[in-house]
Amino acid sequence: MSSEHYFSATPGSEPGLRKFHARLVGQVYELTTGNGIFSPERVDAGTEVLLSHVPAPPPGGDLLDLGSGWGPIAISMAIHSPRATVWAVDVNERALDLVRTNAAALGLTNINAARPDDVPDGVRFTTIWSNPPIRVGKNELHGLLERWLPRLESDSDAWLVVQRNLGSDSLHRWLQATFPEDFAFSRAATNKGYRVLRGRRRTSADPHASED
């Protein structure tokens, strides 16, 4: 088994490009996958849980899929909100190439597949959806969230899916303790061993949101 990780920037394995079928937004699509990326053969269980428990994304603005892989979350956002700009952000260059390939195959012109440093600093997001890369380690994960969650617009939500036995509850506590008072975090759903965490960025005039 290769020691290569899906969060490698430039996978060294052979691309192994191939077609597969995935159900997204209630429809089955033929898409392209490859080696050296996260969940290359299917929509993984955590992403399925996330997509089944989030509300429809905002119809406009900039939307973020953080840790996009081959693109199931970004594609779902883009189908739901054709007038929005969807940023599919990942460090894995092969995954980003597959997002571009799959977006083109589906005629989705509103997806920008980008490395983290290629997203303009001034972009702010009307929502963030993420199946974050838990296995990168706690410090790297925390740094990732500290970088991107502050770019959420006021009166907007971030949605994270985390496996319960990989530390979803401890991550929830860390989020509550780390982010400023204009953020409120709650557990939105539990399903198939996963937690869906909601991070709401309030305006200063908003009342304090209730939490689990």
Image (cartoon, rainbow, N blue to C red):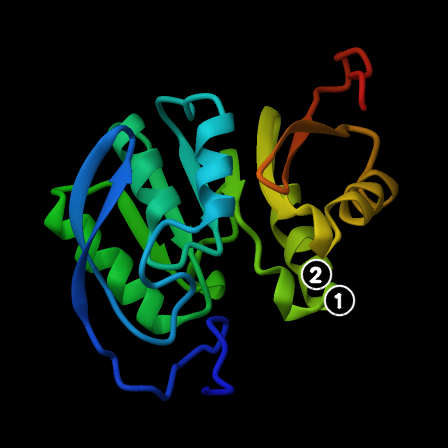
Horizontal relation, residue 65 to residue 20: left or right: right
**Quadrant of res 154:** top right
Residue that appears at 77% across and 28% down: 182
Q: Which residue is drawn at 53% across and 49% down?
A: 131
- Which image quarter: residue 2? bottom left
Q: How crowded is mark 2: few (under 14 residues within 10 Å), some or many (20 or more)?
A: few
- Which of the image's four quarters has the C terminus? top right
- Check the image and report above or below for 31 versus 92: above
Residue 82 relative to residue 182: left or right: left
Q: Residue 152, how many percent across, how many down?
A: 59, 36
Q: Mark 1 points at which residue?
A: 139
Q: List x then y, in percent, for residue 63.
A: 43, 37
Q: Residues within 10 Å of mark 1 (few under 14, many from 20)?
A: few
Alpha-carbon span between mark 1 and mark 2: 6 Å
Q: Is residue 35 above or below residue 67?
A: below
Disc 1 marks which amino acid?
Asn
Residue highlighted by disc 2:
143
Looking at the rendered structure, the kind of residue marked 2 is Gly
- Image position, residue 126 (x, y; %): 50, 30
Q: In this view, does 200 lie to the left or right of 84?
A: right
Which element is circle 2 on?
helix
**Residue at x 45% of width, y 53% of height:** 120
Query: Could you say which is closer to the camera, residue 133 or residue 146?
Result: 133
| Residue 42 position within the rendered picture, expressed as x and y whole percent measured from the top left | 33, 54
Q: Are marks 1 and 2 in contact (CB under 8 Å)?
A: yes
Residue 47 appears anywhere in the view? yes
Where residue 148 is drawn, which disc sits there? none
